Image (cartoon, rainbow, N blue to C red):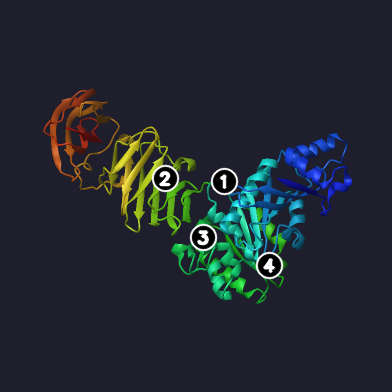
C-alpha cells in the first residue's frame, strides 16, 4: 500500500515536515492514516483534524490483477464518532482518479456537507465499468471503511459519460446486504447500454478491450456491465434498480443529444418499475462533467438512505449468489440472466414469488425482513414461468411442518432439514402453497388455499383438538373438551383409504391405530370431534412397511 498525503489544495505536505514522500509512504503503510496523524500531533506537528485532508492511495486488490489508485478527501469537520456519507465518483472515458476533483465542485460540496469523497482509477482509463473495476471499487470502499467512520447506509455514487451509468451498474451487481450497497446514484451524460453505444459508433475498440470482444462475441459481458439492455429485457439487469434512487441528467438542449436519448429511454423503462427516478435537463450545455449541476445532484443524493432489506425485490442476476434476501442458483451460469420477483406480505404471512427463467433454485432468508416463520402457518404463491423443475427453500424454519398443501390438496414434494432448519419445496409451474405448523392457529380453509371440495375442508379448525403421528405409525390425539370422535385417512390422490367413528371420548389424550394392511406411503390424516366445542385437526403421516 502506498499513501501520498496532500494538502487541501493538492500540494504535498512533505514540505511542512521533516518527512520525505517515501518516508510518508512507508510509515503510513505500516500504521494507517489515523494512527499516523496521531503520531504527528504527539511530535508537535499541526493537527490535521481541523483541516480538510486529501490523499492519493494505492492498494493491492482482491483480484490480484493489479493495484488500485484512488483519490480520497476527508472533510474538515470529520469526527470519527459520527459516521459520514461517502460520495464515490466514476471518471469519464480516458480520465483518472483526479478527474472529479479537478473538473467539478463535488470536492468542496462534499467538504461542506461533511461527506468523505473518493474517486478511483479503475483497471484502465477506459474500463467501461467492467467487473474487474467493480471489484476494485469494492476494495476501495472496504479500505475506507476500515480506516474511517462512514455511514454504510449513505454510500452515494456519481459519474459522467463512460462512468455515468456506473452507479446503477455497480448497484445492480451488488445487492447483498453483507457487502457495500449504493444508497442513491447520479448519472451525468451516462452511456446506459454499452451494446447500443457500440453500434451507434460503428465500433468501439476500448469496449472490445474492456469486455474481451465484440457484442456478437461476448454479448453477456456487454449486458451485465450496462445499466440496461434495451433490445431484450430478459437479458438485462435494470430490474435490480427498483429500489435505487436514480438521478439522470444531461447537457442543455441538443448539446448532449445521444446521451440524452439514453437517459430518456432508460427513464421511460424505470418510471414504471423504480421507486424513485428523476430526469433532469442541465442548465449547462455540453457533455459529461461540464454540464454537472453539483449542488442539485448532491441535494438529491442526500435525501436517501439505503434500504437493504425491502419486502419486495426484483432481480435480473448475472451470476449466482446473494441478492437481498434471496440466494439464487442458475441453470446456466454465465450464459443468461436469472430473473426473479418476490413480494412478502408480513402481516398476512404470505409470499408471492416468481421465477421467470434460468433459475434452478432459490433459498430465501425471510427472517431478515421480519417474515414470520415461527407461527402457525405461512402461505406462498410460487410461479415458475418457464415451467421447468425448480426448488424454493426457506431458511430459518424452526420446526417441521405438520402438512404442506398445494392448491388446497395434500402435497408431499417437500423436505425439512431439522439441523439446518431449511424447508425445501419442489415445483414446476404456478401454484399456491400453504405450510401449516400449528393447525389450530391457521386461518379458515379458504384463506389458506384449501380446496373446499376436499374431504378435509369440511372440518372446521379450533385449538381444542391436536393430533400428531406416533412412533408406531399410528396417530396420537389430545382433546381439551369431550365429544364424539371420528377420523379419515386420505392418500396422495385424494381418496379416502381408511377411517372410523370412534364414539364419545372424554378430554385427554389417546391414540388411533392404523391397519397393518395399509400400503407404504405418505397420507393425510384428519380427526374431527363433535360436541360442545366441535373442531378438527390434520397432519401428514408416513407409513413404512
Q: Which residue is mark 1?
A: 179
Circle on res. 224: 3
Mark toward the start of the polypeptide (3 vs 2): 3
Distance, label 3 to label 2, CA atoms, is 23 Å
Distance, label 1 to label 3, CA atoms, is 19 Å
Q: Which residue is mark 4?
A: 288
Label 1 with label 2: CB-CB less than 8 Å: no
Mark toward the start of the polypeptide (4 vs 3): 3
Which quarter of the rendering shows the C terminus?
A: top left
Q: Nearer the viewer, residue 193 or 346?
A: 193
Q: Nearer the viewer, residue 181 or 13?
A: 13
Q: Residues within 10 Å of mark 3 (few under 14, many from 20)?
A: many
For the question of whether residue 115 can be seen, the reply is: no
Mark toward the start of the polypeptide (1 vs 3): 1
Vertical position of residue 274 compared to residue 466: above or below: below
Label count reads 4
For the question of whether residue 94 can be seen, the reply is: yes
Q: Position of residue 132 (x, y in %)?
A: 58, 55
Distance, label 1 to label 2, CA atoms, is 18 Å
Mark toward the start of the polypeptide (4 vs 1): 1
Vertical position of residue 188 compared to residue 438: above or below: below
Q: Residues within 10 Å of mark 2 (few under 14, many from 20)?
A: some
Report the residue at 75% width, 39% height from top. 34
Distance, label 4 to label 1, CA atoms, is 29 Å
Q: Which residue is mark 2?
A: 363
Q: Nearer the viewer, mark 1 or mark 3?
A: 3
Label 1 with label 3: CB-CB less than 8 Å: no
Amino acid at each position: 500500500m502506498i499513501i501520498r498525503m496532500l494538502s487541501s489544495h493538492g500540494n504535498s505536505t512533505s514540505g511542512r515536515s521533516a518527512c520525505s514522500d517515501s518516508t510518508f509512504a512507508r510509515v503510513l503503510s505500516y500504521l494507517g492514516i489515523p494512527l499516523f496523524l496521531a503520531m504527528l500531533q504527539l511530535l508537535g506537528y499541526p493537527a490535521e483534524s481541523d483541516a480538510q485532508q486529501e490523499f492519493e492511495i494505492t492498494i493491492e486488490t482482491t483480484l490480484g490483477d493489479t493495484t488500485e489508485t484512488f483519490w480520497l478527501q476527508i472533510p474538515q469537520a470529520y469526527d470519527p464518532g459520527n459516521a459520514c456519507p461517502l460520495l464515490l465518483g466514476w471518471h469519464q472515458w480516458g480520465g483518472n482518479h483526479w478527474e472529479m476533483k479537478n473538473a467539478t465542485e463535488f470536492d468542496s460540496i462534499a467538504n461542506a456537507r461533511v461527506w468523505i469523497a473518493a474517486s478511483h482509477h479503475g483497471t484502465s482509463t477506459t474500463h467501461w465499468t467492467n467487473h474487474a473495476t467493480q471489484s476494485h471499487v469494492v476494495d476501495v470502499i472496504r479500505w475506507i471503511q476500515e480506516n474511517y467512520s462512514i455511514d454504510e447506509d449513505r454510500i452515494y455514487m456519481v459519474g459522467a459519460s463512460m462512468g455515468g451509468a456506473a452507479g446503477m451498474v455497480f448497484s445492480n451487481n451488488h445487492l447483498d446486504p453483507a457487502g457495500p450497497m449504493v444508497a442513491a446514484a447520479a448519472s451525468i451524460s451516462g452511456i446506459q447500454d454499452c451494446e447500443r453505444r457500440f453500434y451507434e459508433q460503428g465500433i468501439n475498440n476500448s469496449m472490445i478491450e474492456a469486455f474481451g470482444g465484440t457484442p456478437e462475441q461476448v454479448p453477456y459481458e456487454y449486458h451485465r456491465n450496462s445499466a440496461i439492455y434495451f433490445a431484450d429485457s430478459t437479458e438485462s439487469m435494470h430490474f435490480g434498480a427498483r429500489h435505487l434512487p436514480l438521478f439522470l441528467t444531461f447537457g442543455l438542449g441538443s448539446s448532449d443529444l445521444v446521451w440524452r436519448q439514453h437517459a430518456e429511454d432508460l427513464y421511460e423503462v424505470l418510471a414504471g418499475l423504480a421507486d424513485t427516478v428523476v430526469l433532469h435537463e442541465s442548465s449547462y450545455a455540453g457533455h459529461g462533467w461540464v454540464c454537472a449541476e453539483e449542488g442539485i445532484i448532491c441535494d438529491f443524493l442526500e435525501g436517501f438512505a439505503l434500504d437493504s432489506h425491502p419486502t419486495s425485490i426484483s432481480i435480473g442476476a448475472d451470476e449466482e449468489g446473494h441478492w437481498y434476501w434471496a440466494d439464487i442458483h442458475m441453470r446456466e451460469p454465465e450464459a443468461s440472466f436469472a430473473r426473479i420477483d418476490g413480494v412478502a406480505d408480513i402481516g398476512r404471512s404470505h409470499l408471492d414469488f416468481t421465477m421467470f427463467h434460468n433459475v434452478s433454485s432459490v433459498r430465501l432468508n425471510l427472517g431478515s425482513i421480519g417474515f414470520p416463520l415461527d407461527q402457525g402457518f405461512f402461505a406462498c404463491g410460487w410461479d415458475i414461468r418457464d415451467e421447468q423443475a425448480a426448488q424454493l427453500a426457506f431458511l430459518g424454519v424452526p420446526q417441521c411442518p405438520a402438512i404442506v398443501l398445494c392448491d388446497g390438496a395434500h402435497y408431499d414434494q417437500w423436505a425439512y432439514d431439522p439441523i439446518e432448519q431449511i424447508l425445501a419445496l419442489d415445483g414446476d409451474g404456478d401454484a399456491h402453497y400453504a405450510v401449516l405448523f400449528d393447525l389450530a392457529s391457521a386461518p379458515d380453509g379458504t384463506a389458506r388455499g384449501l380446496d373446499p371440495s376436499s374431504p378435509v375442508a369440511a372440518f372446521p379448525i379450533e385449538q381444542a383438538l391436536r393430533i400428531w403421528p406416533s412412533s408406531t405409525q399410528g396417530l396420537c390425539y389430545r382433546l381439551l373438551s369431550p365429544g364424539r370422535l371420528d377420523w379419515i385417512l386420505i392418500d396422495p390422490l385424494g381418496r379416502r383409504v381408511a377411517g372410523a367413528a370412534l364414539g364419545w371420548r372424554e378430554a385427554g389424550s389417546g391414540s388411533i391405530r392404523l391397519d397393518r394392511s395399509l400400503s407404504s406411503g405418505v397420507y393425510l390424516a384428519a380427526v374431527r370431534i363433535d360436541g360442545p366445542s366441535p373442531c378438527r385437526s390434520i397432519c401428514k403421516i408416513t407409513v413404512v412397511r
